[in-house]
Image (tube, helix red, strand yellow):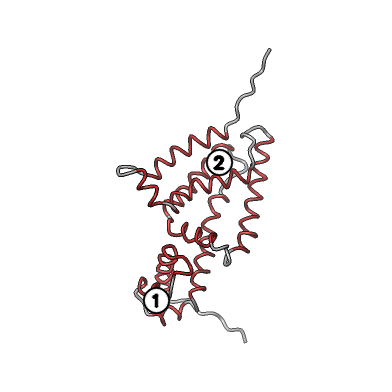
Amino acid sequence: MTHLTRPRTRIQVKNSETILDAALEVFSAHGFRGATLDLISDVAGLSKPNLLYYFASKEAMHQALLTRLLETWLDPLREMDASGDPVEELMGYVRRKLELSRDYPRESRLFANEILQGAPRIRAAIAGDLKALVDEKCAVLTTWMDQGRITRVHPVHLIFSIWALTQHYADFDVQVREVLGPGHDPFAEAGEFLNVLFSRLLTPTPTLIVA
């Protein structure tokens, strides 16, 4: 006889999301090793047994967050359209990555902490889904370069540079704001700067033809 999984009730969904949000807060602030069930319980406002009813362990919460995060992280690159204008598509990707850092700073720090620990819980996904998507989009970039539509640069390092120059604003938010000082909007200013930087890098220089 087949046992069907009962759909979760509204309160179960709410509690699960409350726990994951609390876990995200704790993991992004303390890292995986520094996070404890007691800390997550305090932030969630739920008892530790209640936490363990929904998630079997700290590891299970962390894995759930990373699985969800990786999908969110890949979406901006997935949206790069091979049939679009190359510079516009790449600048759209830069913009989406910067917006992701602005809107999901805790998730960005969670991902950075996992990578700094050697990615023990997400390495397979990096070597699998993430690498496959990067390879796919690098093939698109290479085609655009072969067609002379964008400047020829190393496609993987181009993507790395976009990651570095956008995720920095989430992972080093305190440093960014302290150095800029009051009265600045880091993400608006970064958007303007990165638009100039990458559009100039990627727009091919016209070939000078001497008669």
Which label sits in the foreground, 1 or 2?
1
Q: Say which residue appears at 48% left-offset and 44% top-offset.
A: 95
Q: Earlier in the sequence, mark 1 or mark 2?
A: 1
Q: Secondary structure at mark 2?
A: helix
Which sits in the foreground, 68 or 1?
A: 68
Q: Say which residue appears at 47% left-offset and 49% top-offset.
A: 168
What numbered label is drawn on residue 38? Answer: 1
The image shows residue 195, relative to residue 60, as above or below, that is: above
Which sits in the foreground, 115 or 3?
A: 115
Screen quadrant of the N terminus: bottom right
Q: Secondary structure at mark 1?
A: helix
What numbered label is drawn on residue 55? Answer: none
The image shows residue 118, relative to residue 201, as above or below, that is: below
Residue 135: x and y, percent?
66, 50
Which sits in the foreground, 11 or 156?
A: 156
Q: Residues within 10 Å of mark 2 (few under 14, many from 20)?
A: some
Left of 86 or right of it: where is 46? left
Which sits in the foreground, 187 or 14?
A: 187
Judged from this view, the residue extending furthest toward the top is 211
Residue 122: x and y, percent?
58, 64
Quadrant of residue 90 within the rendered picture? top right
Residue 37: x and y, percent?
43, 76
Circle 2 is placed at which residue position? Answer: 89
Residue 189: x and y, percent?
40, 40
Amino acid type of disc 2? Glu
Quote the CA–CA distance across marks 1 and 2.
Answer: 45 Å
